[in-house]
Amino acid sequence: MTTITITEGLAELKTINKRIQKKEQYIQQYLIRQEKLKDPLEKDGGSHEVIRRERQALDDLRERTVKLRTAIRGASEMNKIAVCGINRSIADWLTWRREVAQGAGQFLDLLRGTIATVRKQAAEKQLQVRQATETGAEPDDVIINISESGLAGEIEKHEEILGTLDGQLSLKDATTFITVED
């Protein structure tokens, strides 16, 4: 059993992926040869034996990947991070960032852009723009059915969460230990 930080585990995963690619290329290089050609790996036990060892090494690296990912996932599910008053597990934050954050940010930007476009068009036509909560609207007035200051606050909070989250994740990854089977 080895105890390392999540950051170290993630770095090891990158190294493993590079090693896997190199080993796969190496195996392909010696996979086939004509009988009449001398075996270039004869001194190392022959191409057949070297390829067998390299394939075993690939299996070992792939198994190490599974063990590292399992340990990281377990730690990510157990450890929590608070960002801008929202407390979630690391796993939940990663899911939010990967599957929710971009779409939510784009939608907030779309709302802001739509309002800006409508305000500009209304100004060109000399129409009044009012919030839905205002009274005394005229029939030609353009009504915005969302609080613009509330929207600005949501956009700011979304950007703050994104800005803070990566730093918090990096800090937590550097200080959270995982135990991985050897």
Image: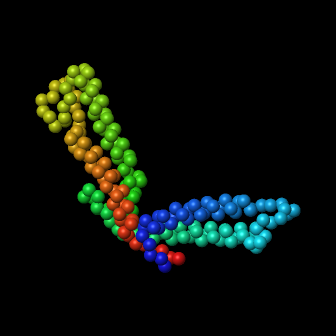
**Residue 39 relative to residue 138: left or right:** right
**Residue 75 relative to residue 144: left or right:** right
Please state the horizontal and vertical placement of residue 167, each as a whole percent of the image.
34, 58
Q: Nearer the viewer, residue 99 or 55?
A: 55
At horizontal 24% and vertical 42% (from top left) the residue drawn is 152
Which residue, as the protein is rendered here, is positioned at the far left?
136
Q: How many marks?
A: 0
Quadrant in the rendering for residue 119: top left
At horizontal 35% and vertical 47% (from top left) the residue drawn is 104
Which residue, as the protein is rendered here, is positioned at the far right?
36
Residue 89 visible in image: no
**Residue 101 relative to residue 12: left or right:** left
Which residue, as the protein is rendered here, is positioned at the far bottom?
1
At horizontal 28% and vertical 33% (from top left) the residue drawn is 115
Chosen colour scheme:
rainbow
**Residue 30 relative to residue 94: left or right:** right
Quadrant in the rendering for residue 45: bottom right
Relative to 123, is 81 above or below? below
Residue 12 visible in image: yes
Q: Nearer the viewer, residue 34 or 77?
A: 34
At horizontal 62% and vertical 67% (from top left) the residue drawn is 58
Relative to 147, is 20 above or below? below
Please state the horizontal and vertical placement of residue 88, each as a whole percent of the image.
32, 62
Relative to 50, is 143 above or below? above
Which residue, as the protein is rendered here, is positioned at the far front?
43
Please state the horizontal and vertical placement of residue 114, each as a whole percent of the image.
31, 34
